[in-house]
Image: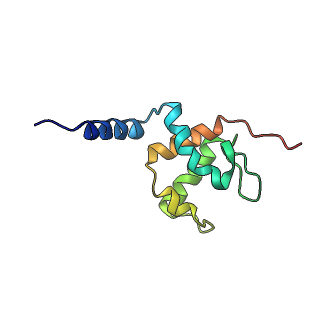
């Protein structure tokens, strides 16, 4: 039985996203969804907490708490975090930790 090219591509993408060691490009693509609230590259322009430069362990713990529904102060983040795998959340925490927060003029 032959698999379609689409099925093969889907399996390849699924394995890349679920891999504990993700390439930087897919992580940056995941991080793009954070920009609407947390600012471009995690540099929040307003009241929403910035993510750039935050310690990886702090961000990872916070994302895990959101996903588990254990943060009583969460607004939409519990629903957003629930859509990511644990590996994806860990990769996002690592990605933002490695970014430099922009300095305010």
Q: Which residue lies furthest to the front in this view?
A: 5
Whether residue 91 sits left or right of residue 40 in the image: it is left
Pick the front one: 11 or 76: 11
Pick the front one: 69 or 40: 40
Residue 60: x, y in percent? 56, 47
The image quarter in which residue 41 lies = top right
- Position of 41 relative to 64 (above/below): above
Q: Which residue is painted at 48% across and 60% down in the image? A: 68
Q: In which quarter of the image is the N terminus?
A: top left
The image quarter in which residue 6 lies = top left
Q: Which residue is painted at 71% across and 54% down in the image? A: 49
Q: Which residue is painted at 52% across and 33% down in the image? A: 25
Whether residue 26 sits left or right of residue 95 in the image: it is left
Q: Which residue is painted at 60% across and 67% down in the image? A: 75
Q: In which quarter of the image is the C terminus?
A: top right
Residue 45: x, y in percent? 76, 52
Whether residue 72 sits left or right of residue 53 in the image: it is left
Count of numbered labels shown in the rendering: 0
Residue 27: x, y in percent? 52, 38
Residue 33: x, y in percent? 56, 50
């Amino acid at each position: 039985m032959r698999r379609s090219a689409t099925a093969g591509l889907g399996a390849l993408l699924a394995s890349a996203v679920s891999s504990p060691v993700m390439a930087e490009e897919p992580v940056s693509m995941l991080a793009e969804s954070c920009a609407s609230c947390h600012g471009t590259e995690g540099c929040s322009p307003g009241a929403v907490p910035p993510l750039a430069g935050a310690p990886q362990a702090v961000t990872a713990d916070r994302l895990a708490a959101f996903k588990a529904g254990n943060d009583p102060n969460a607004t939409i983040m519990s629903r957003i975090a629930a859509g990511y795998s644990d590996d994806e959340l860990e990769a996002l925490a690592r990605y933002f930790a490695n970014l430099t927060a922009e300095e305010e003029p």
